[in-house]
Image (cartoon, grey):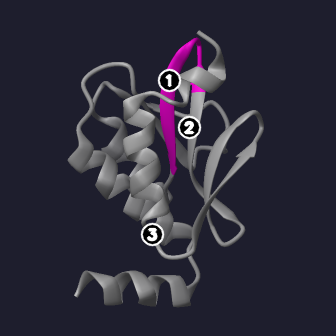
């Protein structure tokens, strides 16, 4: 299966909706795969690593260690230890993905974006 078709899988479509629902979030293709940005900064990426579909999140150092405990998470091969990834070819915990998408977004979003996100949550 080619990479473009992999990114049309239901898991990617659902994760894409989560990412694009955030204030001022946008999708771009960079480095050969879809990336989601808050303004100019990437907060989430879809990738094929070792032939397997995955999703990557940008986290702060204190958020990384607890997130890596479940076996389905792994340190993203790039990103200087600030990214974690999750395989998307097995059982997917959507509650956890939602939490990580928002945490990752909050780590890079501008104050006005965070204000809009918090206003929408009320």
Q: Position of residue 28 (x, y in %)?
A: 70, 52
On residue 17, the disc is none
At a point 63% along the width and 48% down the height, the residue shown is: 35
User: Which residue in the structure is indicated by mark 2?
Assistant: 46
Q: Assess whether mark 3 and mark 2 are in contact (beta carbons under 8 angstroms).
A: no
Q: Assess whether mark 1 and mark 2 are in contact (beta carbons under 8 angstroms).
A: yes
On residue 53, the disc is 1
Label 1 vs 3, first from the N-terminus: 3
| Magenta-drawn segment | 48-57
Query: Residue 98, can we see it?
Result: yes
Query: Residue 62, can we see it?
Result: no
Which image quadrant for residue 108? bottom right
At a point 58% along the width and 82% down the height, the residue shown is: 110
User: Which residue in the structure is indicated by mark 3?
Assistant: 22
Q: In the figure, is residue 49 to the left or right of 84?
A: right
Q: Quadrant of the N terminus?
A: top right
């Amino acid at each position: 299966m080619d990479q473009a078709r992999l990114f049309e899988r239901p898991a990617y479509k659902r994760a894409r909706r989560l990412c694009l629902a955030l204030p001022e979030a946008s999708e771009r293709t960079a480095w050969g795969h879809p990336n989601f940005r808050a303004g100019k900064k990437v907060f989430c990426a879809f990738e094929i690593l070792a032939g397997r579909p995955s999703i990557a999140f940008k986290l702060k150092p204190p958020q990384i260690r607890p997130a890596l405990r479940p076996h389905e998470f792994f340190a993203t091969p790039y990103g200087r230890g600030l990214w974690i990834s999750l395989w998307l070819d097995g059982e997917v915990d959507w509650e956890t993905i939602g939490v990580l998408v928002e945490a990752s977004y909050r780590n890079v979003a501008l104050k006005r974006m965070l204000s809009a996100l918090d206003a929408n949550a009320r």
